[in-house]
Amino acid sequence: MRGVDPRLRRLRLRLSAIFVLLAALVVVDEIIKEGYAFDPVDLVDPRLTHEKLFVLFLALGLLLGLRSHKRELKSQ
């Protein structure tokens, strides 16, 4: 099995870091605008909320980061 292109691996890790940073910024924005960090009730609200953005960005960041890390471990 061929290894993953190092450029693709670096891109995945950078995207992962960007999504995690965006998730952190969403929480900071939520604290500034609403006065609280996370309200799980807002996840079921049909409108787009800070909580939904946080979950989306964090999930994307973790999935990209873990996928890259998992492939790195397999290649060793």
Image: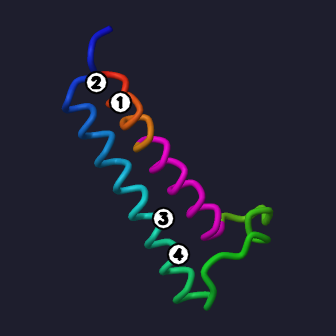
Residues marked 3 and 4 touching at CB (< 8 Å): yes
User: Magenta-highlighted stretch: main secondary structure?
Assistant: helix
Instruction: Provide the residue designation for mark 2.
Output: 76
Whole-angstrom CA distance, mark 3 to mark 1, is: 26 Å
Work out whether 56 lies above or below 28. Answer: above
In the image, 34: left or right of 58? Answer: right
Residues marked 2 and 1 touching at CB (< 8 Å): yes
Instruction: Return the mark for residue 23.
Output: 3
Q: Amino acid at mark 2?
A: Gln
Between disc 3 and disc 1, whose residue precedes? Answer: 3
Q: Amino acid at mark 3?
A: Ala
Disc 3: CA contacts within 10 A as few (<14), some (14-19) or many (>=20): many
Q: Which residue ends up furthest to the left in the rendered image?
A: 7
Whole-angstrom CA distance, mark 4 to mark 1, is: 31 Å
Q: Which quadrant: the C terminus?
A: top left
Q: Which residues are magenta?
A: 49-64
Work out whether 69 lies above or below 16. Answer: above
Instruction: Return the mark for residue 73.
Output: 1
- Residue 9 locus on image (x, y percent): 27, 34
